[in-house]
Amino acid sequence: MSEPLLKLISTALQHHTTRYSDSGLFMGIFTLTLIENTKKYGLRTSTAIKVYKHLVEQCNVYLKGDSCGCKVPVEFSSCDSLVALAHSMITSKPACMLDSRETQQISSLITQAFLYSIPCNSSGTACFGRTVTIGIEGQSVNHSSVFPGLLLDVPEMLLPGDLERLGDGPFKVVLFGVSLSGDISEVGDVALEVHRGLNPERDLLQQLLKIGEQVVKDKVSLFACQKVVHPVLQHYLREHEVVVIERLGLALMEPFAKITGARAVASLFSLVPMEAYGLVAGLCFQDCGSKKLLQLLSSKHAAISTMVLCHRNETMLEELKMTCQRAEHVLRLTLREPYALLGGGCTETQLATHITHMNQSTAPTTAAALGISHSEFLMAVESFRSSLLAVALSLEHDGQDCLIDLTYGHRWVMDISSQTEVKHTCGCGLLEDRSNLEKTHLNTACQTFSPVFLENNDTQPKVLDSFSAKLNALNVAVEMASLVLDVKYIIKDVN
């Protein structure tokens, strides 16, 4: 973007989505609409900034309070709310190209992976586990699955009989973070003194075989290396029934070390210390679509799992992988704040209704406290309300009218599946339509009211948004709009 103010907003939006993985669209639309409405209503910048700051503080108090009608608790005794939250993330990303059955399956897998990442039986400070994602192109989404432990490509020449000969675990593991290719250029940052008549490559191979002899003597069953392992060393290890995994790659070094407890050996020229060895509880093969993978099971209760995602082509697969990673991040945020907000625009409509009603009676005293006129205050409240409702309106892409009910303050659209009568569907799925529920078009003038708080409602909303993400997006949007409105001059470096 060439426009400096748009670059500023874009950067803030990117920072938000990096930290929270959700509500980026809400933040962008709300920020720009606040700026636009301030100009549209002819508000003074200082007035708008004062009132917006006051209103967002009221929103924070309402959303964090016990009487908030658009906040629902996330119950970890049941997976329903977690699956609904993941489901909402998936459905908001149409480029994943999933049908309803596939969406439900992926939502369940994300929740399963999230639960695997929570450490069990840990004393002291608990650390999150890790979900490793593997993509398989050209397979049906239905072949996607989640496995406990770590899945790796099956090493060459490893057969099921080789694992059977190992017997039952646990198995001792060693992990190397340096190249074992035998190439002098890959020895690392060391000084080599080569005497006349000596063959460096041959001597290096002898050193590699010494390492092989040591790990065999120490009864190692799994030998892993981040980089290449010399064919002669591989042959020696296999002869002694040691499973060899080479080219592990930097990305898998951390999860491999976590699941085994092994410390990566960083030198060829010293013995492997005993404390560097790790353990795996078991090794087995897993069939994932068209691919066979080697599964490592943890012996240390490490919260590591592998999500295998399948899709029809590379583009869809990459979109699905990114979406699943972000959805799992959103689920992790619920451990810090175990709440979710009603999705489908219902939080925006409720918040707009609550703020308008709350400030209607207190407008004279609040305006005086802020040092502005009564009419200016009400105009700024209307600008804020209209901006929230603009986000709710933006969710409709089929040209249907958006409504708001005058009892609970939820957003409604026409139920296109109903063939017999005119029915409307609640945006979040919490409410059922009924004939005596009065509604009006969104963003039109109506009598202010306080949304009725639903108590003892056992119905589970179908669409949920991240509480932490939307709360932060709301505050950052107001902050960015105020900052942009307050800009008097832009200084550019033209050199």
Image (cartoon, rainbow, N blue to C red):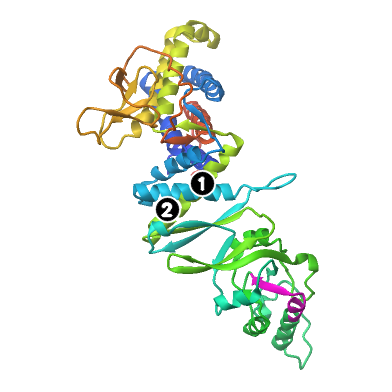
Q: Is residue 316 left or right of residue 168?
A: left
Decide: few, some or many residues near mark 1? Use Cα within 10 Å; few <14, some 14-19, many ≥20. many
What residue is shown at x 43% (from left), y 43% (from top)? 87
The answer to which of 17 and 108 lies nearer the viewer is: 108
Closer to the eye: label 2 or 1: 1
Residue to which mark 2 is pinned? 319
**Above or below: residue 57 compared with residue 99:** above
Kindly identify the amino acid type of the residue bearing the numbered disc 2: Glu
Distance between the Cα atoms at labels 2 and 1?
A: 18 Å
Task: Name the one closer to the observer, 440 or 159.
Answer: 159
Q: Is residue 225 left or right of residue 420?
A: right
Above/below status of 18 relative to 226? above
The span shown in magenta is 213-225
Q: Amino acid at mark 1?
A: Thr
Q: In what element is the residue under mark 1?
A: helix
| Residue at (26, 28) in percent of width and height | 423
Please say whether residue 175 is one of the residues in the magenta stretch.
no
Q: Are marks 2 and 1 in contact (CB under 8 Å)?
A: no
Q: Residue furthest left?
A: 420
Q: Is residue 10 left or right of residue 258?
A: left
Q: Nearer the viewer, residue 259 or 44?
A: 259
Q: Which residue is mark 1?
A: 111
Say which element carries label 2.
helix
